[in-house]
Amino acid sequence: IEAKYAHDAAKAEQMIADGELIEHAIVYDQYKGIPKAGVRAALASGRDVVMRVDVQGAATVRQLAPQAVTIFLTAETEEALIERLRRRHTEDEAQLQRRIITARAELARANEFKYRVVNCECNLDETVDQVTAIIQAEKCRIDWQPVMI
């Protein structure tokens, strides 16, 4: 589940006030958050839930559900990450510099996660396989507990 982009700031603020989001933040001037209802429904049905959140969102999820499996996805190196950001051509130079600063700060917090997976360029299948293996291995743990939010 990816953080929903709320282009309607009033709606996003109402969802926050009503406690409808697991986590939320203003990221690059946009409201983002993960609605509780969808996650709870998926968990109740026995499905695995993958949330795409930043380090701040992951910290919130860890507080709510310490048993949650957290995986930090990263590029091979900081230089490779910066090059990927540059090649996207989705930001002007000031925005790009802001994203680079944010990426460096997030890389510094990788040790807060249970796992780190390197997403090598042009090798998405291996990255997916590693994430899938982590999820499967976690379910085999003697002390495994379902996540409740």
Image: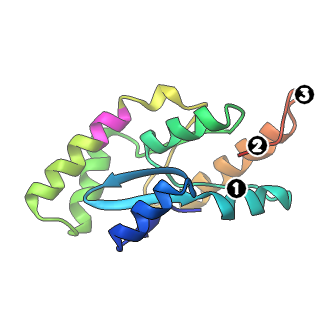
- Magenta range is 103-107
Residue 1 in the image: state x and y as whole percent.
Answer: 59, 62
Cα distance between the residues tagged 2 and 1: 9 Å
Residue drawn 28% across and 37% down?
Answer: 104
Residue 80 in the image: state x and y as whole percent.
Answer: 31, 47
Q: Earlier in the sequence, mark 3 or mark 1?
A: 1
Q: Is residue 128 above or below residue 54?
A: below
Residue 118 in the image: state x and y as whole percent.
Answer: 50, 43
For discs 3 and 2, the disc positioned in front in the rendered view: 2
Q: Are marks 2 and 1 in contact (CB under 8 Å)?
A: yes
Residue hosting label 3: 142
Q: Is residue 133 above or below residue 89?
A: above
Q: Which mark is residue 96?
A: none
Residue hosting label 1: 49
Q: Is residue 13 above or below residue 69?
A: below
State left or right for residue 62 relative to residue 13.
right
Residue drawn 24% across and 64% down?
Answer: 87
Residue hosting label 2: 147
Circle 2: residue type: Val
Cα distance between the residues tagged 3 and 2: 15 Å
Residue drawn 43% across and 40% down?
Answer: 56
Label 1 residue SS: loop
Q: Earlier in the sequence, mark 2 or mark 1?
A: 1
For discs 3 and 1, the disc positioned in front in the rendered view: 1
For discs 2 and 1, the disc positioned in front in the rendered view: 2
